[in-house]
Amino acid sequence: MTDTTLRVGFVGAGNNTRRRHIPGFQKQPDVDLVAVANRTKESGERVAKEFGVARVYADWRDLVRARDVDAVCVGTWPDMHCEITLAALEHGKHVLCEARMAMDAAEGRRMLAAARRAPHLVAQLVPAPHTLEVDATLQALLAEGYAGEVLAVELQAAQGRFLDRDEPLHWRHDASLSGLNVLNMGIWYEAMMRWLGPAHRVTAMTKIAVPRRRDATGAWHDVRVPDHVDVLAQLQSGAVAHLRFSAVTALAPPSEVWIFGSEGTLRLEADARRLSGARRGEDALREIPIPADRRIGWRVEEEFVSAIRGRETVRRTTFEDGVRYMEFTAAVARSAALGQAVDVTDL
């Protein structure tokens, strides 16, 4: 596609779509926001009025069939990602799909297969934003041998608040909407793959701290999505990783990653977007400056539009990497259910 106007439609205009994607597309030259389909037509109309979207659909299927829509941004819960993506690709639309690719690895593979059948269309997943500003520098340090051989990894991702047993059922608690996606496990693993590659084998233990919650109507639901996950993983590189994802570790330190190598140690502080490290012979960590040209940050919509116009290829994030993180979440679920180590299926 050349620099002709790109016409974008939105299926599921929730918080992230309104906060990031719609403003992101509005900043791109020659992009028109032509349609929206939300959970209700009324909520779609509110989005259209707020952002100047031209048309509102009551049924998302009509949006993906519309001839004047070139690309679809999928911002629904994970339970709809696969169906909408398949339909959009079938009708010749480029697809930007929200993170947490699908309900499970099988759906992710179907999405990837459909994208491969339509190589002229761009298929992109929204990347996790929490490490984007440090990724390039961390990747370069590891590639240059700063840590030497990576031996062990410690990753802790905590929400930092006390458990609320009376909190209403959220879609992330509801396996019928979120599938095998647990807390922020998949998006952290996606980031870790950028630096260290995928895992080969995992052993996992999980805890559901609140087994039943009420929904917005007051009805009770069984909760099958864990509130806490501990994972031991062997990476394909040979390193061993300990990964903890938790909604119950109140007052825990902020989310961070330690990478221990034969020649150096690296520490990533996610909230501060800061790197520090030390090499053999040094006795304390020191902050590692991140050059401005490497502190790239959020450019998801720009990358999507540029890929459609043939100026770059998608890197953050491909459907292939999405399937890899869904394979990881599936392996964690299998390991926790079986009480034993399991292999992570490769593409």
Image (tube, rainbow, N blue to C red):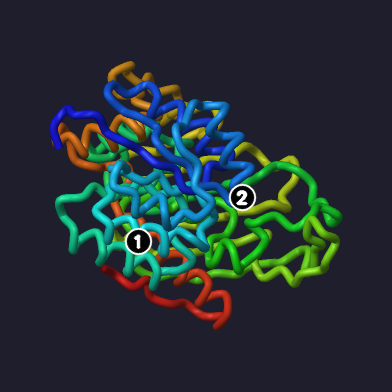
Residue density around tag 2, few if under 14, some if 14–19, many if 20 or more, within 10 Å: few
Residue at the image point whose x is 35% and y is 61% from the top: 87
Question: Tag count in the figure?
Answer: 2
Instruction: Name the residue: 28% across, 21% down.
Output: 29
Q: Residue furthest bottom?
A: 338
Circle 1 — which element? helix
Query: Which residue is painted at 82% across and 59% down in the image?
Result: 217
Q: Is residue 247 left or right of residue 298?
A: right
Q: Which residue is mark 2?
A: 40
Residue 58 is left or right of residue 264, and the answer is right
Q: 333 or 109, which is in the foreground?
A: 109
Q: Amino acid at mark 2?
A: Thr
Of residues 174 and 338, the one nearer the viewer is 174
| Foreground disc of the pair 1, 2 | 2
Q: Quadrant of the C terminus?
A: bottom left
- Estimate the x, y position of residue 304 in percent, counting from the top left: 29, 37
Towards the viewer: 218 or 37: 37
* Element type where label 2 sits in the image: loop
| Mark 1–mark 2 distance (CA, rounded to whole Å) | 20 Å
Q: Which image quadrant is residue 207 in? A: bottom right
**Residue 284 in view of the camera:** no
The amino acid sitting under disc 1 is Ala
Q: Between residue 243 and residue 185, name the one nearer to us.
A: 185
Which numbered marker is on residue 87? 1
Residue at 28% across, 47% down: 67
